[in-house]
């Protein structure tokens, strides 16, 4: 019997699923001349809000700029503290510094890779203003447990970068905290090239975010352009930014949004296939999916390589897979171990043992909507051969 491993394949870690429909969708804004935030952005926001069961959605240039806006809308400034998990993409910490506030790291759970709820109380001080739970790789953080231990004046901002279409106890990601922000970077489940979406149920938080997204202008551009009064310029009462999404991106986003649930369904099927086929490998543990995760968005399939059981260090395993044409990546990084943060706050690697372990031992294996049955079997056999 010949092994599937005999012929080398080339399997990238993630590939965006875009096609002719997205290409066609860009024609209309391109030819109409309305290129930046306009009717397509408005429609994208409305449909995104409907799909995530929230009252308000605001399209922005990225999840990072959206998180910045959300923190500003929540009133975060110098002297305030914001609690974040120590194992997340660096942007979750950077946005806190953009506001002049201090990021307070919290450890993560080695099974779910999400913020460790039991570690939160010791991080709360009278300066704590916001906590940012991250729905890492599309698995919602245990929001109800977090809400029940965090005093009610502390706001919850979901970093839902990876969690479009995810749900928690049947409730949509993006509707779980006071505010949430999603990403449409090509590495996420749906993409607009760059892009993000800020969601909230709160009218005032949405209004503040909307004003700051557009230079601090009190009158939205759409209203100004359609006004009969040519002398009407908006007033500016606060410091704003330019975080507007283009209508070209929103046109692509609208098409991608229609495919979101089928993308997730397909990824879920393959994630379950991986989990079933890989369960014989004692040193490889997939991200735990607790019962409260009624829908994991499977932005990535990330495993924990148990250093006590694995036949060799994780990096050697990644090297072997690379030679077989299989791309892998560490899940993400421990922010407190990155030079900028380590030096700035004099944090020791061992201060957050869960985050350190996840940094050293997590491994994302290929999962995207362009993979075939043979690709999945090839990855599985390559892992078994180690
Ligand atoms: C990707 C990601 C971000 C940043 O998203 P951008 O849209 O690239 O700014 C923030 N947080 C997490 C957890 C992410 O995975």
Image (spheres, grey):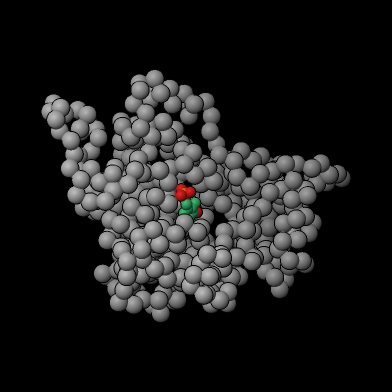
Query: Which residue lies at the image location 37% right of the left edge and 50% below the top edge?
Result: 66
Q: From the viewer's perspective, tell me whether residue 376 is left or right of residue 235.
A: right
Outermost residue, top side: 31
User: Left of 170 or right of it: where is 205?
Assistant: left
User: Quarter of the image containing the N terminus?
Assistant: top right
Residue 291 location, x and y as percent?
47, 63
Where residue 341 appears, as percent x and y from the top left, is: 51, 67
Closer to the camera in the image, 109 or 182: 182
Viewport quadrant of the C terminus: bottom right
- For this orientation, the residue located farthest to the right is 1
Q: Hey, which quadrant is residue 100 in on the image?
A: bottom left
State the residue lying farthest toward the bottom. 122
Which residue is nearer to you in this view: 182 or 230?
230
Q: Nearer the viewer, residue 254 or 218?
A: 218
Nearest to the observer: residue 291 or residue 333: 333
Residue 241 spot, x, y in % from top left: 32, 46
């Amino acid at each position: 019997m010949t092994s599937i491993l005999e012929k080398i394949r080339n399997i990238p870690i993630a590939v965006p699923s875009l096609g002719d429909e997205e290409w066609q969708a860009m024609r209309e804004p391109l030819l109409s001349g309305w290129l930046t935030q306009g009717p397509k952005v408005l429609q994208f926001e409305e449909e995104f809000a409907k799909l995530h069961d929230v009252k308000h959605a605001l399209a922005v240039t990225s999840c990072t700029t959206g998180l910045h806006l959300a923190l500003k809308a929540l009133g975060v400034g110098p002297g305030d503290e914001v609690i974040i998990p120590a194992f997340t993409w660096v942007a979750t910490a950077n946005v806190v510094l953009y506001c002049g506030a201090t990021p307070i790291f919290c450890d993560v759970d080695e099974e779910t890779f999400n913020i460790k709820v039991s570690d939160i109380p010791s991080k709360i001080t009278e300066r704590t203003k916001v906590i940012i739970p991250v729905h890492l790789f599309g698995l919602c953080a245990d929001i109800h447990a977090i809400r029940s231990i965090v005093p009610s004046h502390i706001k919850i901002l979901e970093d839902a970068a990876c969690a479009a279409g995810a749900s928690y106890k049947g409730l949509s990601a993006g509707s779980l905290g006071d505010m949430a922000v999603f990403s449409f970077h090509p590495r996420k489940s749906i993409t607009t090239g760059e892009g993000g979406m800020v969601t909230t149920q709160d009218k005032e938080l949405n209004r503040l975010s909307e004003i700051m997204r557009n230079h601090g202008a009190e009158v939205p551009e759409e209203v100004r352009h359609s006004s009969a009064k040519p002398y009407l310029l908006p007033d500016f009462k606060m410091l704003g930014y330019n975080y507007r999404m283009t209508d070209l991106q929103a046109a692509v986003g609208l098409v991608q949004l229609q495919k979101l649930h089928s993308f997730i369904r397909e990824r879920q099927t393959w994630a379950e296939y991986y989990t079933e086929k890989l369960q014989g490998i004692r040193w490889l543990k997939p991200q735990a999916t607790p019962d409260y995760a009624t829908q994991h968005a499977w932005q990535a399939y990330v495993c924990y390589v148990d250093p006590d059981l694995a036949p060799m260090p994780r990096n050697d395993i990644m090297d072997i897979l690379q030679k077989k044409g299989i791309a892998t990546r560490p899940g993400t990084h421990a922010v407190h171990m990155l030079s900028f943060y380590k030096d700035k706050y004099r944090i020791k690697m061992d201060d957050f043992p869960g985050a350190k372990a996840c940094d050293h031992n997590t491994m994302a294996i290929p999962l995207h909507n362009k993979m075939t049955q043979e690709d999945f079997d090839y990855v599985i056999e390559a892992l078994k051969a180690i």
